[in-house]
Amino acid sequence: MATNGNGEPSFRQSVDLMFNRAVSRMNLSPGLEEKIRVCNSTYTVRFGVRLRGKIETFTGYRSVHSEHMEPVKGGIRYALSVNQDEVEALAALMTYKCALVETPFGGSKGGLCIDPRQWDEHELEQITRRFAYELIKRSLIHPAQNVPAPDMGTGEREMAWIADQFARMNTTEINAKACVTGKPPHAGGIQGRVEATGRGVQYALREFFRHPDDMKAARLSGTLEGKRVIVQGLGNVGYHAAKFISEEDGAIITAIIERDGALVDEKGLNVEDVRQWIVKTGSVKGYAGATFVADGARVLENACDILIPAAMEGVVHMGNAANIKAPLIIEAANGPITFGGDEILRKKGTLIIPDMYANAGGVTVSYFEWVKNLSHIRFGRMQRRAEEGRSRILVEELERLSADQGLGWQLAPDFKEKFLQGSDELALVRSGLDDTMRTAYQAIREVWHSRNDVEDLRVAAYIVAISRVATSYQSKGL
């Protein structure tokens, strides 16, 4: 097998090897196994855009891994590291991720080989619109066939440009807004989408800590409160995950690792302060509230209870896995642990909550946004005030009975306020995400605990996902 030069399988090979570990424990026919494993198609586009007085040529990709369900779903990333193998591996992960959390999509992924920081906003818009044009005219962006979303290097702004480009090219398509998710709310997006992946990481951890047997396997006990956490990458996912578990669950963020170094404070970092410093200066250097460590990768090996790799793939590998001290790792990024690193960590007893589950919050809320766009109504609009009205009738009747019977008791004001509040879109999105993360984890742990040949959560997650994909293909007559 070809490796990446240090004896380590590439990211694409790691995904295939992890797939093979799972299917070796399943009873699939060789033909069906191969059909699920391979990437159906990859479109490579090279297009020119006139910028700064000359024509710049860009290379982009859109891979479709599996069409067992349509549309297919998957983000578009902007990074200089984008290549066909990476995009195909990410598309495969999307197939398994969507199956695992039961969103009705196949797996896809896109990428543009570009450093977005090198271009002004109006230049990025030109590049994005041209890339979108190349994909749209081949139905590689379409509400019924292929629905992108944000990924590394892209966000609400880019999704709004893509949605507008699609609408311009399909003037009579009533569902045009559903061609892409992750849009800003005013452009057909949904409340809670920006934070969704980080919020999903929080809900995944909460669900894990509800199961004493699972905590025991990770040599942990209690709750999230007081747990020492190291976060690698304070982008959208890492920032929201760290913010929520520290502010709402009482976890202590002892280190934050970024591309130019790390900040360490055993008493706990203020995630919002660090984020604002990075936004202001573009770096973690010079932040006064913590110790700066130039070699950020080394901080991955610091003692902690939970490690959250939330940036790039392959940060935990054969070279450093043996030195990782965290008993629990939750993969907020895609593929942050290589196949070789995973082998080392499993042998030393480290428990890993795998990426295909842990970071599925994004695609889950993207699903909600897609449904919202197809239904042409925001969630909560029809029922919110009806809920409030029914709750008010109940509260008023309880208070009347208390007064009539001379009981003298009163409902607590904070209870009354919460009970009388109908569910708006954000509340419903969070409820749906929480339910999705809970049920998906329960399906994984059921396989993990019920089968002697399944030694970890990753294999269990793959088995659940592949079984669902296989069932879909079989129902199509394959």
Image: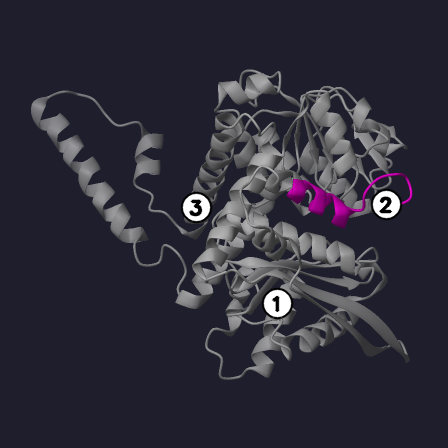
Instruction: Give how far across and how far down residue 387 sits, in percent.
Output: 27, 48
CA separation in Å, label 2 and label 3: 41 Å
**Magenta span has 5?**
yes
User: Which mark is nearer the camera, 2 or 3?
Assistant: 2
The local secondary structure at tag 1 comes to helix
Which residues, given as a range, are shown in magenta? 1-20
Residue contact at pointers 1 and 2, CB within 8 angstroms:
no
Instruction: Give how far across and how far down residue 57 sits, in percent.
Output: 85, 74
CA separation in Å, label 1 and label 2: 39 Å
Q: Which residue is mark 3?
A: 432
> Dot 3: within a 10 Å radius of its alpha carbon, few (fewer than 14), some, or many (20 or more) residues?
some
Q: Which residue is mark 1?
A: 160
* Disc on the earlier residue, 2 or 3: 2
Amino acid marked by disc 3: Gly
The local secondary structure at tag 2 comes to loop
**Magenta span has 460?**
no
Residue drawn at x 46%, y 33% is 442
Q: Which residue is mark 2?
A: 3
> Would residue 286 appear left or right of 87 to someone viewing this image?
right
